[in-house]
Image (tube, grey):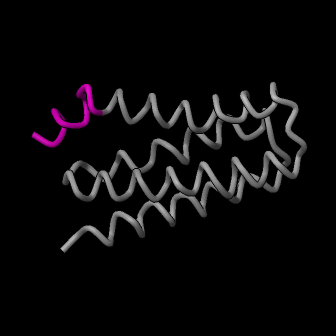
C-alpha cells in the first residue's frame, strides 16, 4: 500500500510545487532584475525556508510518506547551479533539516 501512495496524484502535486519553488521563483527574481542580495534574501532565506516548513508540516499532518520531503531539496540541487553561487549547495542540507524538523513536530 505504501508504494501505491508514492505513485499517486499527490506525488505529482508535491513535485510540481517543489519544482515551482526551486526553479520558477529564482527565474522570476532574475527577470525582475533583483540584485544578488535580494535574491539570496527572498529566495534562499524567505520563500524556500517557508516552503520547507510548510511542506514538513503538511506531510506530517496528513500522515503521508516521508519520501515527499526529499523532493524539494533534490530539485533545489538541480537548479541551484543556474541561479546561485557554489555556496548555495549547502542550503539543500538546511532545507532538508528544516523540513524533517517540521515533519517531526507533527509526529506523535
Q: Residue at x 32, y 72 (%)?
A: 105
The residue sitting at the left extreme is 1
The quarter in which the C terminus is drawn is: bottom left
- Residue 12, located in which quarter of the rendered image? top left
> From which residue to which does the magenta span run?
1-10
In the visual, does 4 lie left or right of 74?
left
Q: Nearer the viewer, residue 85 or 32?
A: 32
In the visual, does 106 lie left or right of 51?
left
Q: Is residue 2 magenta?
A: yes
The quarter in which the N terminus is drawn is: top left
Q: Nearer the viewer, residue 77 or 46?
A: 46
Q: Residue at x 23, y 28 (%)?
A: 8
Against 73, is 87 above or below? below
Looking at the magenta stretch, what is its main secondary structure? Answer: helix
Q: Is residue 53 magenta?
A: no
In the visual, does 1 lie left or right of 88?
left
- Residue 10, located in which quarter of the rendered image? top left
In the visual, does 67 lie left or right of 18?
left
Q: Nearer the viewer, residue 29 or 10?
A: 29
Q: Residue at x 45, y 48 (%)?
A: 70
Q: Position of residue 94 (x, y in %)?
A: 60, 63
Q: Nearer the viewer, residue 87 or 46?
A: 46
Q: Position of residue 23 (x, y in %)?
A: 64, 32
Against 98, is 35 above or below? above
Count of numbered badges drawn on the protein: 0
Against 1, is 73 above or below? below
Q: Residue at x 76, y 53 (%)?
A: 88
Q: Position of residue 65 (x, y in %)?
A: 25, 49
Amino acid at each position: 500500500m505504501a508504494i501505491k501512495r508514492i505513485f499517486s496524484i499527490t506525488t505529482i502535486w508535491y513535485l510540481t510545487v517543489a519544482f515551482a519553488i526551486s526553479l520558477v521563483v529564482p527565474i522570476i527574481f532574475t527577470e525582475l532584475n533583483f540584485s544578488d542580495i535580494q535574491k539570496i534574501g527572498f529566495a534562499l532565506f524567505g520563500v524556500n525556508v517557508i516552503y520547507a516548513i510548510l511542506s514538513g508540516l503538511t506531510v506530517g499532518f496528513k500522515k503521508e510518506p516521508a519520501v515527499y520531503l526529499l523532493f524539494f531539496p533534490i530539485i533545489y540541487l538541480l537548479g541551484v547551479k543556474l541561479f546561485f553561487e557554489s555556496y548555495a549547495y549547502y542550503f539543500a542540507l538546511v532545507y532538508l533539516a528544516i523540513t524533517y524538523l517540521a515533519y517531526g513536530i507533527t509526529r506523535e
